[in-house]
Amino acid sequence: MKPERDITLDELHNQNHDNPNSAWLAINGIVYDVASFLKSHPGGQTVILSVAGTDCTEAFHVYHPAWVEKTHLLGGVIPLLGRLADDAAVVVPHAGTFDFLVEDGAAHEGRGVAAG
């Protein structure tokens, strides 16, 4: 499915899309509503909600193998809403490591950022 509408960073960040009822995030310039996937996410819903309302492209690629993008995002498991508007720059929500995404101090099956 091809994204049909442009979504601005303002709409992504500032329109209350960071909660269990409306959890939008952008990955590779495409905006998804992951609310329906929160309870199924192997890393827990807190992980997703911590980056909801942002462009979390970098964090997504740090913690997921390529097949997740192919099956869940490109494969249509996660509903897509649109694409980031052309003037939207990629926004990484946090600099440095993504340790804040790991719940209860447990690594995400070895896909976390190496210490160093």
Image: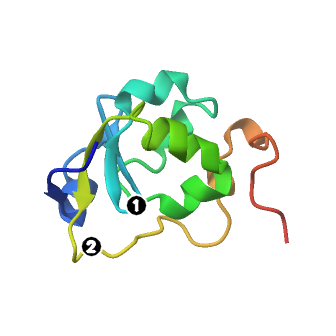
Name the outermost residue toward the right.
Answer: 116
Earlier sequence position, callout 2 versus callout 1: 1
Quadrant housing residue 41: top right
Quadrant in the picture for the N terminus: top left
Element under disc 1: loop
Left or right position of 63 against 54: right
On the image, the x and y values in percent for residue 11 come to: 18, 56
- Residue type at the position of mark 2: Ala
Residue located beneath label 2 in the image: 88
Element under disc 2: loop
- Identify whether 45 is placed above or below 11: above
Quadrant housing residue 26: bottom left
Q: What crowding class fits label 2: few (fewer than 14 Cα within 10 Å), some (14-19), or many (20 or more)?
A: some
Residue depicted at 24% across the width and 64% down the height = 9
Pick the residue in front: 112 or 20: 112
Left or right position of 59 against 99: left
Name the outermost residue toward the left.
Answer: 5
- Identify whether 67 is placed above or below 115: above
Q: CA distance from mark 2 to mark 1?
A: 10 Å
On the image, the x and y values in percent for residue 48 come to: 49, 41
Quadrant housing residue 105: top right
Left or right position of 95 against 15: right
Mark 2 in CB contact with mark 1 (< 8 angstroms): yes
Residue located beneath label 1 in the image: 55
On the image, the x and y values in percent for residue 63 come to: 66, 50
